[in-house]
Amino acid sequence: MIKLLFIFTLIAFTYSCEKGTGNFVLKGKVSDLTFNTGLEGAQMKIYKVPIGTTSEQLIETIVLSADGNYNISFPREKMEKYVVKITKLNYFAIEESIFYSELSLEDENVRNFSTEAKSWAAIRIINNFPTNNDHLRYIKQAGYQGCTECCPSIEQNYFGALDTTFYCVNIGNTIYSIYYWIVNTNNQGLKEATTVAFDTTEIFLAY
């Protein structure tokens, strides 16, 4: 009886050990949508986040080749989730969480990512003949929004003398535009430009 119990215990222990072994394989492609290529030279990091914590523990760092393909293998551990972060200078960063329950041990886990090059609109506004009653109002019509670097998408108001330039991040090689009007006048219209990737393009408004 004792011998039989010992055998059952040994089998259970062996099964438990085998169940916890193995590697997850995460593979796919990171694309540069601005130039329709792989995101060559980007740095890709994968972190593990233990259950019940927000602590990100680095597992591996790789640099992407010209085709943007990646293949990462890492030990299977019971984690809350894994976090993928991809960065490259003058590109919008990528960050994505992959929960433990979404990963397969038997199959390769394919995750494709994409991002775009940054550009900037330099909004140059000058009031050539200012008075205290002048009221400029404008609102963004087209352009990247929702990021920490983005300029506001809500209506903006300026009064009196104005001579300023401010910079708004945008997706490279796409249009950035504002619609403006000088309150209580007929002076209104659209100002726009295609902002060149990795560069700053001026949008000039004088009134």
Image (spheres, grey):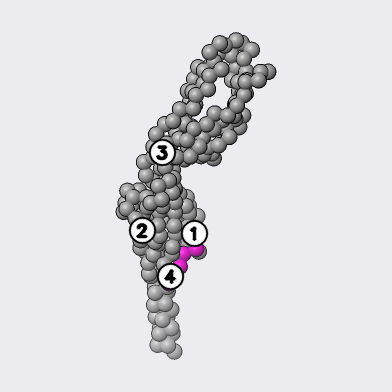
Distance from the alpha carbon under mark 4 to that under mark 3: 38 Å
Distance from the alpha carbon under mark 4 to that under mark 1: 16 Å
Q: Earlier in the sequence, mark 4 or mark 3?
A: 4
Closer to us: 144 or 103: 144
| Label 4 vs label 1, nearer the camera | 4
The quarter of the image holding the C terminus is top right
The quarter of the image holding the N terminus is bottom left
Q: Which residues are magenta?
A: 102-106
What amino acid is at disc 1?
A: Phe
Name the spot of residue 99 as percent of width and height, x first: 49, 59
Closer to us: 77 or 121: 121
SS for dot 2:
strand
Q: Tell me if residue 204 comes above or below residue 93 in the rendering.
A: above
Most common secondary structure along the magenta stretch: loop
Q: Residue at x 52, y 39 (%)?
A: 144
Q: Residue at x 42, y 31 (%)?
A: 200
Q: Residue at x 45, y 40 (%)?
A: 173
What amino acid is at disc 3?
A: Ala
Q: Earlier in the sequence, mark 2 or mark 3?
A: 2
Circle on res. 198: none
Residue 103 lies within the magenta run: yes
Name the spot of residue 51 as percent of width and height, x first: 48, 57
Circle on res. 70: 2
SS for dot 4:
loop
Q: Residues within 10 Å of mark 2 (few under 14, many from 20)?
A: some
Residue 113 lies within the magenta run: no
